[in-house]
Image: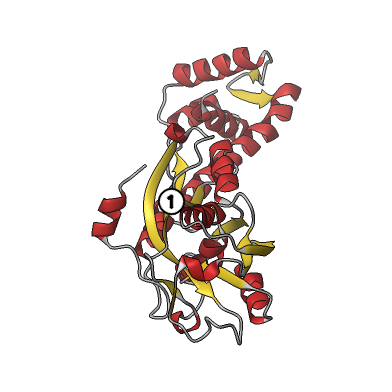
């Protein structure tokens, strides 16, 4: 149904004169009459009584009048809403990420973004990389911030994956522990030590388990957690050693790996078959423009991104 026909119908209902309405909308009287007849045929109802030189609404016309006005108002509201999206006056973004991304990186990025575009609403979900990947693929999330590689159990060909940040994992040591005054640790230092580990199945846990296995080191896992703050507090309470992102703690309070820097590649993922809204484009730009504070780990350089490549 042509919105122009609805507009002409409403104008004719208001004026009650076919000739005057035709002149107002720059049509001939027969052309306007033909539009009304086509609308009546489409609706299966007579909208106007033809009487002398004028017209008057039938009962069907009176009933349809309010619906036609509402339809045009809704279309106008839709145009206004689309204009707001284009200007970033409104919109929504749903993002999923691990503890490091949601706790240590996103607050600063979203804070600056919100100050510039206060009409944009965010939905943030903290979860493992596998859960985030699945939620992006299902359409529950617009963007995911995950640790590479993408799990082999999912169809990665449906994803756009762009390397984002190289994150270093560092070791937290309880007070009075023999390693407390060291600046670096070796994997052998962790043998038989109480370890507060990330939850089983998480990307970081898999990375750590591979390193421990490679160096034939078997710590005693005394606790499995996901939240960075909880791990930090448990270490401070003397329960065991714990790994966290360098972005989460001042480096003076943590030990780096002496054998080889323990790094992981964080990436931004989204579905290939979804076009980006202006809001998405602007927020992606903010993600890739992010720089850590002096107390945080370095951001991946362009050369490092090239070395890791895209997935």
Question: Please, is residue 16 above or below residue 237 in the view?
Answer: above
In depth, the one of 115 and 225 nearer the eye is 225
Find residue 160 and report its image quarter: top left
Question: Please, is residue 299 above or below residue 204 in the view?
Answer: below
Name the residue: 65% across, 19% down.
51
Name the residue: 48% across, 46% down.
82
User: Is residue 263 in view from this perspective?
Assistant: yes
**Residue occupying the far right of the picture:** 59
Q: Quadrant of the N terminus?
A: top right
Question: Please, is residue 36 above or below residue 162 in the view?
Answer: above
Q: State the image coordinates of residue 233 (x, y, percent, origin top left).
A: 66, 77
Q: How is the image coloured?
A: secondary structure
Q: Decide if residue 307 is on the left or right side of residue 110.
A: left
Q: State the image coordinates of residue 43 (x, y, percent, origin top left).
A: 65, 17
In depth, the one of 243 and 291 nearer the eye is 243
Question: Please, is residue 44 above or below residue 100 in the view?
Answer: above
Badge 1 crowding class, 10 Å Cα cut-off, few under 14, some 14 to 19, many 20 or more, is many
User: Is residue 24 in view from this perspective?
Assistant: no
Where does label 1 land, which residue?
268
Q: State the image coordinates of residue 292 (x, y, percent, origin top left).
A: 39, 72
In depth, the one of 131 and 82 nearer the eye is 131
Name the residue: 45% across, 35% down.
156
Q: Decide if residue 119 is on the left or right side of residue 298.
A: right
> Total of numbered circles in the picture?
1
Name the residue: 43% across, 73% down.
256
Q: State the image coordinates of residue 197 (x, y, percent, origin top left).
A: 62, 62
Element assignment for label 1: strand
């Amino acid at each position: 149904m042509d919105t122009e026909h609805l507009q002409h119908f409403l104008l004719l209902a208001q004026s009650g004169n076919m000739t005057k309405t035709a002149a107002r909308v720059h049509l001939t009287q027969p052309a306007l009459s033909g539009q009304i007849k086509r609308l009546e045929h489409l609706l299966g109802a007579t909208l106007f009584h033809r009487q002398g030189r004028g017209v008057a609404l039938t009962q069907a016309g009176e009933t349809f009048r309010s619906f036609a006005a509402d339809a045009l108002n809704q279309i106008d509201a839709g145009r206004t809403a689309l204009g707001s999206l284009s200007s970033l006056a409104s919109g929504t973004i749903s993002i999923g990420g691990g503890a490091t991304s949601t706790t240590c990186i996103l607050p600063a990025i979203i804070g600056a973004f919100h100050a510039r575009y206060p009409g944009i609403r965010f939905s943030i979900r903290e979860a493992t990389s596998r859960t985030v990947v699945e939620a992006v693929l299902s359409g529950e999330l617009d963007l995911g911030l995950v640790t590479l590689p993408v799990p082999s159990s999912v169809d990665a060909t449906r994803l756009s994956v762009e390397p984002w940040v190289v994150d270093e994992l560092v070791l937290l040591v309880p007070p009075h522990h023999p390693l407390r005054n060291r600046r670096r640790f070796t994997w052998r230092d962790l043998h038989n030590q109480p370890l507060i580990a990330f939850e089983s199945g998480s990307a970081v846990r898999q990375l750590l388990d591979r390193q421990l296995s490679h160096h034939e080191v078997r710590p005693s896992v005394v606790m499995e957690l996901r939240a960075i703050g909880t791990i930090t507090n448990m270490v401070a309470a003397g329960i065991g050693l714990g790994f966290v992102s360098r972005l989460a703690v001042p480096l003076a309070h943590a030990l780096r790996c002496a054998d080889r820097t323990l790094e992981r590649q964080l990436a931004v993922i989204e579905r290939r078959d979804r076009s980006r809204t202006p809001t998405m484009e602007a927020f992606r730009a903010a993600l890739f423009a992010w720089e850590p504070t002096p107390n945080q780990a370095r951001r991946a350089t362009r050369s490092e991104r090239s070395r890791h490549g895209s997935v």
